[in-house]
Image: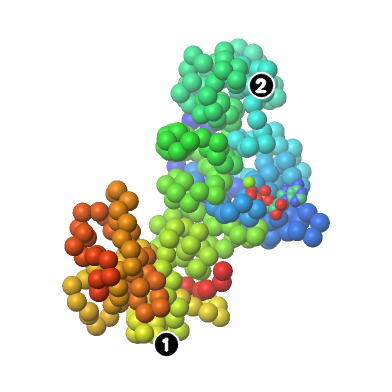
């Protein structure tokens, strides 16, 4: 039996979430005293989907994962795996592979024994255990390293052992809570790609946790942005990045320029807004409702233009220009408003002399109406 033989090979939307590999949280809540660590969370991971919980420290990501894995009891709500409620099941009967910070390798066991341990708990015979442990170690690039203790392995290799241990019993889904947090940048990026490769080749669902927006952007089919135990926005990475619902989400997912505005008119996907001295402007509208509004334009979506034009432009002064190697960062002052601008390096040297008067423009599709809530 190979690992892939027992896993779904295709995502079939028609079959809904009863299919193997689905995870569903319904109104899940967890309180510690007066603190709601997780607050009425509704979330579904479809079979084969890679979903990332992204949020700052303390936003409830780990608590959510602990409840799905069965290490924490829910205060209220239900968790379903493969369409079945699992609230009464202990962790080992939920058939989920987990890599958590709190679930370390046993230091006195070899890598192979650590991986086999997951099978021993499931009462698999020794010969079969050994074969499957070797196979799982090979899958994470650790063939021939099975005899080493964790202390004889690098941080990255230890994380691979943890991953092998999570995969070895053919789980229906993987739960990964900041699995690369302790690794340096290059190793992180390498592991990110390897986890994606393994996930695709097995067709396995993954619920992943990170506080790193680049990691979330590069790995996920869907990003779920969390704040204070709640979901504030979710969607495909490029969609959440391009259409943040609030200034908090926009800032959490990178740099942005926020231009305070009032709404003149909204219809469908567009809105007409008044930007004060920057004039009247047509922007993207996703229907977010609040008390105060702004238009968000990412720094990479501002460009120098030769002269003022009727719309989607601003006239200002260059306050600073910094060459960052691959990109140049400019700060502009438009009246009282500071604008941040990022360009690929070669094009702009002449356009951005210090104190120069310049015009910058943007495309309507890159100007997003959002709610100020931070
Ligand atoms: P994250 O993983 O996003 O950093 P956590 O889920 O660890 O967030 O924590 C969410 C909130 O719940 C925080 O305010 C944290 O202090 C609180 N919390 C988590 N675990 C416990 C616990 N065992 N006892 C009390 N408070 C807790
Ligand atoms: Mg955490």
Q: Quadrant of residue 103?
A: top right
Residue occupying the point 52% across, 73% down: 372
Q: Quadrant of residue 299?
A: bottom left
Residue drawn at x 52%, y 42% is 205
Residue 302 located left or right of residue 88: left
Q: In this rendering, would 238 be left or right of 180?
A: left
Label 2: which residue?
A: 107
* Residue depicted at 48% across the width and 26% down the height: 140
Which residue is labeled 1 in the image? 264
Residue 96, placed above or below residue 280:
above
What residue is drawn where x is 50% and y is 68%?
Answer: 247
Q: Is residue 292 left or right of residue 341?
A: right
- Cβ of mark 1 under 8 Å from ligand 1: the answer is no
Q: Is residue 285 above or below residue 54?
A: below
Classify mark 1: residues with Cα within 10 Å, few (<14), some (14-19) or many (20+): few
For mark 2, give the secondary structure. Answer: loop
Binning the other alpha carbons within 10 Å of mark 2 as few (below 14), some (14 to 19) or many (20 upward) gives: few
Q: Which mark is residue 169?
A: none
Residue 335 screen position, x and y as percent: 37, 79
Let me know if residue 151 appears in the view: yes
Question: Where's residue 295, x and y in %?
Answer: 42, 74
In front of the other: label 1 or label 2? 2
Q: Secondary structure at mark 1?
A: strand
Q: Could you say which is closer to the camera, residue 337 or residue 45?
A: 337
């Amino acid at each position: 039996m190979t690992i892939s033989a027992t896993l779904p090979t295709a995502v079939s939307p028609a079959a809904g979430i009863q299919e193997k590999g689905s995870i569903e949280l319904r109104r899940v809540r967890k309180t510690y005293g007066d603190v709601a660590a997780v607050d009425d969370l509704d979330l579904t991971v479809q079979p084969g989907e890679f979903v990332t919980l992204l949020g700052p420290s303390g936003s409830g990501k780990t608590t959510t994962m602990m409840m799905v894995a069965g290490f924490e009891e829910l205060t209220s709500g239900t968790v379903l795996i493969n369409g079945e409620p699992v609230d009464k099941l202990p962790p080992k009967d939920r058939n989920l592979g987990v890599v958590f910070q709190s679930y370390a390798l046993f230091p006195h066991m070899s890598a192979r024994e650590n991986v086999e341990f997951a099978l021993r708990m499931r009462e698999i015979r020794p010969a079969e255990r050994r074969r499957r442990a070797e196979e799982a170690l090979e899958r994470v690039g650790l063939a021939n390293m099975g005899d080493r203790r964790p202390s004889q392995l690098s941080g990255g290799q230890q994380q691979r052992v943890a991953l092998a241990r999570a995969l070895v019993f053919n789980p229906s889904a993987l739960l990964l809570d900041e699995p690369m947090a302790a690794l340096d940048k290059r190793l992180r990026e390498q592991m990110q790609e390897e986890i994606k490769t393994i996930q695709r080749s097995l067709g396995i669902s993954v619920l992943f946790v990170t506080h790193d927006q680049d990691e979330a952007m590069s790995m996920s089919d869907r990003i779920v942005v969390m704040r204070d135990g709640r979901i504030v926005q979710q969607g495909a990475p490029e969609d959440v990045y391009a259409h943040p619902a609030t200034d908090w989400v926009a800032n959490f997912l990178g740099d942005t320029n926020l231009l305070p505005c009032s709404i003149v008119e909204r219809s469908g996907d567009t809105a007409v807004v008044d930007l004060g001295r920057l004039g009247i402007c047509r922007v993207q509208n996703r229907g977010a409702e609040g008390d105060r509004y702004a238009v968000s334009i990412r720094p990479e979506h501002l460009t120098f233009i030769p002269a003022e034009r009727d719309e989607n432009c601003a006239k200002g002064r260059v306050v600073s220009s910094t060459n960052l190697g691959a990109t140049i960062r400019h700060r502009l002052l438009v009246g009282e408003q500071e604008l941040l601008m990022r360009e690929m390096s070669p094009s702009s040297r002449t356009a951005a002399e210090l104190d120069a008067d310049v015009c910058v423009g943007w495309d309507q599709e890159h100007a997003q109406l959002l709610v100020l809530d931070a």
